[in-house]
Image: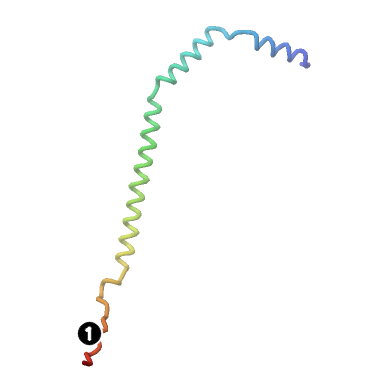
Amino acid sequence: MNEVDLNSLLKRAAQTTPRPSLLSIESAFTEKLRNDDGRTRRWRFFIQLLFIGSLVSGFATAGVVCWSLASQDKTHTTPPTMRLFKEPLSK
C-alpha cells in the first residue's frame, strides 16, 4: 500500500457515516453503563470494607502494642524513693 492508497482509504473512512446498527448497539451499551450502578455499589462496598478492616486492624494492633509495652513497664510497680523518708530531720 502506497501513500495515495492510504490517503484515499482514510478519506473514505472519514466520509462514510457509521451504520445505524452499530450506533444503536453503542448507544444501548452506553445507556446500560450509565444506568447500571450495581458494579459501582459493589466496588463502593468493597472499598468501604477494606477501609473499615484497615481501621479495625490498626486499632487492634495499636492496642496490642500499647498493652504489651504497658505490661513490660516497671515504673509504677514500686513507689519512688523519697529523700524525705530516707534522711532524718536535722532540725
Q: Residue at x 26, y 81 (%)?
A: 82
Which corner quadrant of the image does residue 2 belong to?
top right
Position of residue 6 in the picture relative to residue 30 (left or right): right
Position of residue 90 in the picture relative to residue 38 (left or right): left
Q: Is residue 88 above or below residue 66?
A: below
Closer-to-camera residue (38/11):
11
Position of residue 1 in the picture relative to residue 52 (left or right): right
Q: Residue furthest bottom?
A: 90
Q: Residue at x 37, y 25 (%)?
A: 38
Q: Residue at x 68, y 9 (%)?
A: 12
> For mark 1, does the 10 Å Cα neighbourhood hold few (<14), some (14 to 19), or many (20 or more) residues?
few
Q: Is residue 53 above or below residue 23?
A: below
Which corner quadrant of the image does residue 15 belong to?
top right
Position of residue 56 measured from the top left corner of the image (x, y, whole percent): 33, 47
The residue pinned by badge 1 equals 85
Amino acid at the residue labelled 1: Phe
Q: Residue at x 34, y 42 (%)?
A: 52
